[in-house]
């Protein structure tokens, strides 16, 4: 198959990234600003969001080897690295490409327009003081950015001493990530209630999740089979899908294997995982075009609803009452807009999300429907974004299914 | 640890089997007959039930290698054996010790007082024509009897053409078995809805269930890990317990391994399974004493309830009405008996079971409470059976748990 997407997809000069950015900047962003899109859903995007490398999020109980795993892939230490048998990593660390080694603290990171982290300030300084980037040079960082995280602790220890909501921040990073690796220690398998609820917070990202059963060489093969079996037994219940999650079994650091019996298996598993990592850019660009399409469709219904609310406001008396009535009856209004414009029901946001955004606003200040802007947005969806999507996804190789007798 | 239970526990001359039988025959059986115990719960026991060897039930989709597995353990063909890639075994076969090779058909088996199968006639001739024993000589048959079963088929095929209720018969054999092996084919993993409901029918026998992942040598190690993982993922949901079920991974026939990469693992797993089989007699005798204790306790409350019903019948008028009232209020009567005699609530049968047995009976014909019989039964429980239990279970090695601060 021809390489449709280059390996340096995320360089500012790449045509796909560039095209997405141009569409967003010229056609979507002005409309998002005008119709207060960001007050309801998520902040305006920046160029850095488009240029950001695919992101890999690492999660696991403490000491499972998350930091060692990153070091192994980098084939070097990264600035500020700490590895040890006790809980060591005490913050979120974005390990990313940099020409010289340096650590940038969270507060600086969140205001750096060239970095895709401007959204984290919503977690407050309590979080920003526990967030930093570690920049350095390593071949794999041309393709991906890693997010190292503090190990999940069990019970009381987890809850005290954290100055931010762990599950919530995990959710934010998961949303921005292309791959989420859940690490487990074969030698000390533990799925605490805390980690289980962290996994549950990843609902909706199932397709990004992979599991790593690390330190698999520290036990006998029979023990490994029992541990691996117990892991799948439990994960099946946590995920509750019929499809299994992919588990990579091995020892992901540069030391020789303690028990070399399964050398070949581990090598094959590690090769598979590396291949997955190297294929990330290709898959990630598709995902981002897809996300942009979703954003444009949401913007379209949002605009229609906002201008519908504006249009139905009384001109003189009873404004407050009319607003309250419309907020309460928002589901009905969604249906009206759906019928009037024919936008798919699936494009609409959850009623509660929009209701929350509408509280304490003056609907009379909402803009009217700008027909030409709407037309331009339709063209973005039907033409511009479709063209980009075709460029990044290879033509379908599905054979038509045989007729069932 | 000293061998408290001999390997030939189930020979008629064994002292434990003999002691159980004597207690049952002299003290329990007459009482069971007098108080119609068998009309409510299960048939009278025979000497053959006590002497029966521990029983291993094999279940699985068709062609997973159930019959080949038995042949492998016997190290020989058994009479009537059929092995093949299509659905072959079309009946339940009890493979058991015999001095000469022969096949005994189901109808004859069910009336043979020396065999523990007199209970199967309740499944009718439709089942009896699909049941037989295969007797032959093989060392392992000194310790266990195997029940080979027809493979579970998926969908329509399963339901048509079976002249008996498969799940119900499975339940009966499971009840009489000491070990239930669920076989899966690593090369063609399949957990059909039918097999899933067969597994569900084994509820309450969880502790007897083991899983065999067979033909594990026919695929690569990486494939094996995926298949095994998928199996555990699914089984965890079917069983719905936090504890995993033990899975033996290997290739259970006498052919050399196709893929010898995991030779050592398979050998270790096969050795574990064999050890489990050879330890069955020891564990099984404990289970049987336990079953007899349960039966005696049930008999005790049954007798108390029956004579309570008798006592409360009017002597002349309104018999039918009184009976109906007592059947409807049976839960209340259980409580009365519990309060009067102090028998544990857990000893009582499900209210519905006893209600079903009481329909269309004449309570005035029930016997009164026989105080001396009850006293003898109490002695059986407090002395005779306790002595036997102590004989077969080694003294507890539990250390007292440390006080929690
Ligand atoms: N593949 C491996 N096999 C055996 N031991 C390992 C492996 N990887 C890491 N370790 C050891 O496990 C311990 C924990 O490693 P590391 O600090 O990388 O874990 P972590 O998941 O980042 O922990 P934390 O959550 O505390 O940050 C260290 O002592 C490390 O040497
Ligand atoms: N360990 C094994 N490895 C590979 N093939 C095997 C193994 N055991 C059995 N087979 C093959 O699988 C097929 C089915 O075997 P067998 O008849 O023993 O299965 P079964 O479970 O008893 O099937 P059925 O439910 O139809 O009675 C046969 O062709 C047999 O040679
Ligand atoms: Mg760490
Ligand atoms: Mg068979």
Image: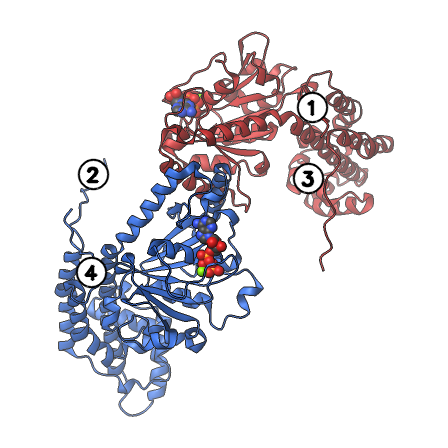
Chain colours: A blue, B red
Look at mark 4 in the image and give the residue it sits on: A9
Position of the C terminus of chain B by quadrant = bottom right
Disc number at residue B349?
3
- Residue located 23% across and 74% down the image: A304
Which of marks 1 and 3 precedes in the sequence? 1
Task: Give the number of callouts.
Answer: 4
Q: Secondary structure at mark 4?
A: loop
Q: Mark 3 vs ligand 2: CB under 8 Å? A: no
Q: Secondary structure at mark 2?
A: loop
Q: Chain of mark 1?
A: B
Query: Same chain for the residues at labels 2 and 1, yes or no?
Result: no
Label 2 crowd bin: few (<14), some (14–19), many (20+), radius 10 Å: few
Q: Are marks 1 and 4 in contact (CB under 8 Å)?
A: no
| Pointer 1 residue | B45
Which one is closest to the eye, mark 3 or mark 1?
Answer: 1
Give the labeled residue for mark 2: A403
Please identify the quarter of the rendering in which residue B24 is found: top right
């Amino acid at each position: 198959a021809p390489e449709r997407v280059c390996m340096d997809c995320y360089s500012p000069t790449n045509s796909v990234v560039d095209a997405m950015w141009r569409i967003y900047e010229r056609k979507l962003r002005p409309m998002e600003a005008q119709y207060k899109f960001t007050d309801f859903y998520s902040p305006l995007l920046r160029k850095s969001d488009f240029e950001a490398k695919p992101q890999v999020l690492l999660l696991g109980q403490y000491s499972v080897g998350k930091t060692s795993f990153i070091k192994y892939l980098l084939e070097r230490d990264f600035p500020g690295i700490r590895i040890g048998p006790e809980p060591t990593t005490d913050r979120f660390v974005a390990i990313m490409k940099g020409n010289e080694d340096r650590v940038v603290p969270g507060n600086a990171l969140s205001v750096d327009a060239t970095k895709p982290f401007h959204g984290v300030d919503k977690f407050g300084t309590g979080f920003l003081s526990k967030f930093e980037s570690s920049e350095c040079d390593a071949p794999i960082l041309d393709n991906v950015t890693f997010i190292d995280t503090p190990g999940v602790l069990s019970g009381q220890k987890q809850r005290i001493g954290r100055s931010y909501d762990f599950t919530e921040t995990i959710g934010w990073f998961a949303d921005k990530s292309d791959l989420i690796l859940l690490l487990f220690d074969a030698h000390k398998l533990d799925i605490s209630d805390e980690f289980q609820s962290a996994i549950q917070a990843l609902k909706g990202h199932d397709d990004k999740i992979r599991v790593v059963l690390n330190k698999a060489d520290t036990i006998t093969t029979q023990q490994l089979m029992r541990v691996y079996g117990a892991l799948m037994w439990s994960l099946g219940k946590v995920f509750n899908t019929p499809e299994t999650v992919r588990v990579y079994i091995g020892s992901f650091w540069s030391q020789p294997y303690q028990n070399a019996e399964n050398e070949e298996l581990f090598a094959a598993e590690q090769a598979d995982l590396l291949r997955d990592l190297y294929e990330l850019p290709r898959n990630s660009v598709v995902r981002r075009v897809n996300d942009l399409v979703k954003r444009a469709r949401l913007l379209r219904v949002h605009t229609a609803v906002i201008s519908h609310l504006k249009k139905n406001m009384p001109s003189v008396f009873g404004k407050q009452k009319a607003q309250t009535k419309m907020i309460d009856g928002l589901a009905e209004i969604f249906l009206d807009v759906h019928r009037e414009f024919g936008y798919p029901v699936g494009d609409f946001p959850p009623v509660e999300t929009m209701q929350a955004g509408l509280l304490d606003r003056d609907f009379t200040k909402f803009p009217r429907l700008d027909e030409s802007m709407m037309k331009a947005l339709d063209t973005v969806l039907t033409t511009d974004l479709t063209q980009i999507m075709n460029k990044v996804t290879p033509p379908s190789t599905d054979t038509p299914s045989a007729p069932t007798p």
